[in-house]
Amino acid sequence: MMLTVKRLTALCICCCLLLAFAACDATRPSDSGGEALDPSSSAIESPVEPVDIPRDPDISRNAWLEAEIDQLWEEGVAIDREAFKAKASLCAGDKTEEEKLYYAMHALPMRADYPYQEPSDYESIMQQVPESMGLVENPPNSEMDDRFYGAWLGRFIGSSLGMPIEMWTPQSIRTWYEKADAWPLNNYVPAVSRAAQEDGLKLNSLTTTLEHIGQVPSDDDTRYTVLNLQVLRLYNITWDTWDLGSIWLWSLPFRLLCTAERTAYLNFACLDDNYMGGKPANHKEIVRKSATYMNPYREWIGAQIRADMWGYAFAGNPREAAKIAFKDAAFTHVKNGIYGEMYIAALIAASFGEKEVSTMVNRALAEIPQQTRLYEAVVTTRDFVNQNKDPEKIIAFIQENFGGYNVIHTIPNAAICTAAVLYSGGDFEKAITFAAMSGHDTDCNCATVGSIMGAYNGAKKIPEKWKNVINDQFDAQILGFENTSITALAQETKRLWEIYGE
């Protein structure tokens, strides 16, 4: 088969990156002044020995260091955030001083009063996971076609809904819709609103607004689902995290990545100097460093949005969905970043056959460790929504309890997805519009909720106003999937489920 120009271009980009990164020296002796800790004394699983890896040029040094300081605090490290942020500002781009500060931060002990136990290895995670609630009885095989198509369609619809208002506050979203005479929110984002002039609001994109939506543009909320479909096709279910990293290097152009994924990609390419020679003997260590080295985004939402394919492939089997999701998440994330993908994968797996949305959530909760911030956040949100059906009160509750995290962090966004599912009572539109109204990472959350509720309802029950504007064609910007259809993606997904998950 002849390669298209687009495929050749992408392949050349990947090869050039690999050849450049492979030349990095990953074993430079320490000049940072930092010392390795006894793992039992620290919450941090980052490699503590210095490695000479290029920093992401799109991220300023001070912003990166400040994000690391916040991340360490959230993980339970006894760090004076204000003092260290002041020190970070004094580094003024000096690489040597930045590294000294980085390793000094990682030499700090845990806070004595930190109440959580948050492992990143699968065996330790499973020690905190209760007995499985078992398999879910899926609909008859003849109905599963509609469920898989509904899941894919729901993800595309949700991503499109949330894209123009990504990272907006709930108040800004409401203002835009109200001044477009379109409140309550019950459709795609209007392209025109008086809020543009009166409040200075500007949409992130016009591509998926109500007046312009057509073929769904590629973004990370849809791209990773397609990529993981490719992982299953190439490696079935026997792949490990190193295999996943290899596929990323060959299939994903670096410039399409964000935050934790960009960092892990760069780390992996530099640390793995054996990519042409098969899996190296130290591949587990390479993977661990890829996820942790100078990666302050290691608990953000990037893994959570990659969960869908594992829920699809193991529809009806939340435990196996969470297990394979762990392997995916471990490439880029640790701790709650990993649990987020496990939770959503299990929730999607349950949504294909479970009758009650509350039971879906409980099934998913049974697949993540209990002594963790994510488990606590989901349980707290679940209990509040069960007692309060006012969407404004639910949104305020999430902001009050989890607003201290970055808007892209796993925890507040997982809370929003949980609340949307429970608040909806099973209604597709009610779920995705709640996710949109809640702010934070709206395209990610709406896509995830759309996937869950699309699988729950099937495509036939999704209202026409949401799906009739979605062109079936999709360019994933993934090698081999430049131009495909949502229908074909759903059909291939069902085929793989029949092999591995049925």
Image (cartoon, rainbow, N blue to C red):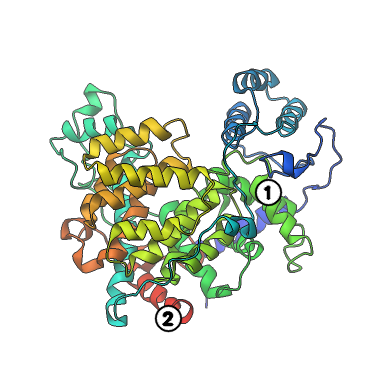
- Left/right placement of residue 246 relative to residue 153 reads right
487 lies left or right of 58: left
Q: CA distance from mark 1 to mark 2?
A: 36 Å
**Coordinates of residue 207 in the picture (x, y in percent):** 30, 47
- Return the disc, 1 or 2, that comes first in the chain's sequence: 1
Amino acid type at circle 1 is: Asn
Q: Is residue 110 above or below residue 217?
A: above
* Residue annotated with mark 1: 267
Q: Amino acid at mark 2?
A: Glu
Q: Position of residue 313 (x, y in %)?
A: 44, 71
Q: Which residue is mark 2?
A: 498
In the rendered image, residue 193, in percent from the top left (x then y), is placed at 19, 33
Q: Residue furthest left?
A: 181
Q: Nearer the viewer, residue 472 or 226?
A: 226
Within-10-Å neighbours for mark 1: few <14, some 14–19, many 20+: many
Task: Work out whether residue 384 or residue 297 is closer to the camera in this orientation and state it.
Answer: 384
Q: Is residue 326 above or below residue 335?
A: below
Count up the numbered dots.
2
Q: Identify the element where label 1 is drawn.
A: helix
> From where the camera sits, is residue 4 visible?
no
Q: Which of the 4 image quarters holds residue 363? A: bottom left
- Tell me the SS state at disc 2: helix
* Residue nearest the viewer, comparing 130 with 334: 130
